[in-house]
Amino acid sequence: MLSRVADSCYWLSRYIERAETSARILDVNMQLLLDLEDSSPEAIQRHWQPVLATLEDQELFTKTYDTITADAVMEFVTFDKKNPSSIVSCIGNARENARTVREQISSEMWEQLNRTYLYLRDGGGRHDFQDSPIDFYRRLVDILHGFQGTTDATMTHGEGWDFLQLGKYLERADSATRVLDIKYHILLPKGEQVGGHVDVTQWMAVLRSCSAMEAYFKINVGHVSGWQVAEFLVLHDEFPRSIRFCVDRVDGALHRISGCDRAHFSNEAERLSGMLKSNLGYTTIESVFQQGLHQFLDQTQARLNEISAAATKTYCYWMDESAQTQVQA
Amino acid sequence: MYSPLVSAHAGKKLYEQKPALHLQKPASVALKDCELMKGLFKDYEVGDFFDEMFSAPGQVRPHYDLLYQRFQEMEVDEFERKCALAEKSYLNQGITFTVYSGDEGTERIFPFDLIPRIIPGKEWEHVERGLVQRLTALNMFLHDVYHDQRIVKEGLIPSEIVNSAKHFRPEFMGFDVPRNIYIHVCGTDLIRDRQGNYTVLEDNGRCPSGVSYVLENRQAMKRVFPKLFTKYAVRPVDRYAQDLLAALRYCAPGGNPDPTVVVLTPGIYNSAYFEHSFLARSMGIEIVTGNDLVVQNSRVYMKTTKGLKQVDVIYRRIDDDFLDPTVFRKDSVLGVPGLVEAYSKGYVALANSIGTGVADDKVTYYYVPKMIKFYLGEDPILPNVDTYLTSDDTERKYVLDNLEKLVVKAANESGGYGMLIGPHATKEQVEKFRAAIIADPRGYIAQPVINLSRSPSFCDGAIEGRHIDLRPYIISGEKTSIIPGGLTRVALRKGSLVVNSSQGGGSKDTWVLDGEEED
């Protein structure tokens, strides 16, 4: 497969996943807003500020908007074309990448992605958003899930598909670290206790933004604590949005691409993914909290970035020293 | 038990019942006057042109009869709904080109007219023979020009015409191209004169585009008018990609039986990118940009996830000038350094070959009928449009005296640029061309204004006659083949004779009918 094509498949997939994450985070934050008892501008600001922090968009945001309001944050993260990680930008980038690899992906995938782009761009997207942001974000997540289904059902599960999986699961693992980290940025209102009413609501929001609530309650019946939520989202073996699960898929995709046995490595990306996979396989939530959840998440993000850089260097930019990788946060 | 399957078989009956047109012998629909033209055609004016559908007001040509009947049943709003449906399908599939204005591009679809152009089988046979003859002569001419120049030595074409052709590449004198094929894909533009005779307007022997629209228009028509389509026995066009791939494989260096073939595109910002990608997908081969290729040891390789992979044949959709910055334009970022060297050493084949532009120069065009006689000893089956060479003193005088009656074309422009249509031009434009011709007599030709044939087209809520041409795509490989029909381009602006998409043109599906129906 052409190196450029592999690169485009990889990024196409990351951008789709990124758009989905943003839509989920905004959906959940909108819902939380409804439960917010204090509706002063300061409270609203406290409520939305973590979203920007999680998406690492704060600096750009303050350049364009004066104050943090629900409308401003949603506009910025959803429709703002000047924001390179807004949903519209992500879908646009995914589509540009798809355009260059149309001979690799199926027509069904292309058409679905193209329709999504047109929907957001000038089709009914804006209108649906104005009607009901929550419904709009859910619809968007639905559409993007549809894209994943179409991909699985219509594309040959060969090298191109493996690069799509690599991108998807790397991005998803990264998103999980960010969503969990939201909690780190949210300050509990004065007088609220850890484990109290507001704290539980916030942790439930974290679960919801990973579609993890139902799966979580099957294991931790009727009980929500930060400790258990983190354990679920970091270390669950089978939940498709847990970090451990995603890293396992990343490692699998890398080894399928090279054909190397999973117990070994044939390049730097595989070595790094294998190490991260076994660290996650042999760690406990106790040691994660001992290190500090925020530090652990930060470190995991950095390791995911290293895997990404090593993989694209191995397969996509192996000839050019002046690697012109696509810019991403 | 398996009822769906049974009913699928039952459906086959429909197919078997499909009447071949020649069996049906439709009587020509003679209508007493225009008021009898119903539905969508009720205000249609045939005008003083060759009309593809009506031989006279109220007189439908037999091969359009079924279509006429179908359209009579239809109201304007139903037709408009069908147009919207087709447009939406093009947009969703991303069959678009991008128009840049300001900081963001807008996607447009090429306008598509839902009324097909229909060509009876016999008429097409004549056109097909003429095109094969013409391309055979053009390929022989190119071989001759780059070898002995017999045609020049024997005085048929002045040597300065060849040597001054903008796209003549003297550095390839004596070079043998694989299988002696220069033009692998040719798009020859045909028009029909007042009497309906097919006449050649120009040849495009470099990188002719538009074939993807032939194939996509057909898909759209099948979806929008499935019943009408099945009533006609329309010859399929699907085999284009297979024919093209076969021709490309045929010219692989050293007769390699399993060559790696790629499409070379300038990239996604090129207006024809959709077509490049479409062809690559249809052939099942890689589409590459200049950056994906690298030349080492005079071999061309593509950069893959598993290392370098040698490329044998390149279907390039990049002009000669941009192919290789070390040989042609230094500022080209689209090409591949070293590509021309690899090509000259015979390690990679290019389609079309380098230097074919000397054959589609509009001054060379003037000599094509003579070439056919010279190389093949045959009379041309398809005539040229009468053409005046402004490099000839007598003809130039005539041209300069009659500019407002003539069409003047720059010898090396395409896409409808560099053209003066005398009767439609302002005094200022005429004078600009006068000065340009005097300054560079070799750079122009002139032709009388030909009122291209008209075909009923749906414009602004009504069906009106619009001028059309036809670009068939001729492939030369082991044999020369043409998919039936080609791209019918239509000048959608009222009265316009310019069919190019860059200037308000659209396209139609072209139906070549099977069988020997009578006209």
Image (cartoon, coloured by chain):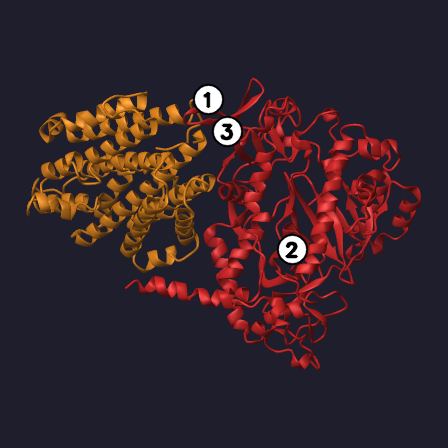
What residue lies at 24% left-to-right and 51% top-to-bottom? Answer: A30
Element class at badge 2? strand
Residue assigned mark 1 = A320
Amino acid type at circle 3 is: Asp
Q: CA distance from mark 3 to mark 1?
A: 11 Å
Q: Chain of mark 1?
A: A
The quarter in which the C terminus of chain B is drawn is bottom right
With respect to residue A80, does B249 lie above or below?
above
- Chain with colour red in the figure: B
| Coordinates of residue B435 in the picture (x, y in percent) | 84, 43
Quadrant of residue A245 in the image? top left
> Label 2 marks which chain's residue?
B
Chain letter of the orange region: A
Q: CA distance from mark 2 to mark 3?
A: 34 Å
Q: Amino acid at mark 2?
A: Arg
At label 3, counting other C-alpha atoms closer than 10 Å, the crowd grade (few under 14, some 14-19, many 20 or more) is: some
- Badge 3 and badge 1 both on one subunit: no
Label 1 Cα crowd, 10 Å radius (few <14 / some 14-19 / many 20+): few
Give the amino acid type for the residue marked by disc 1 in the picture: Asp
Which residue matches tag 3?
Answer: B292
Q: Secondary structure at mark 1?
A: loop
- Seen from the viewer's position, the closer of residues B61 and B73 is B61
Looking at this view, is A47 or B96 the one in front? B96
Can residue B498 be seen here? The reply is no
- x, y (%) of residue B149? 81, 30
The disc at residue B489 is: 2
Q: Nearer the viewer, mark 3 or mark 1?
A: 3
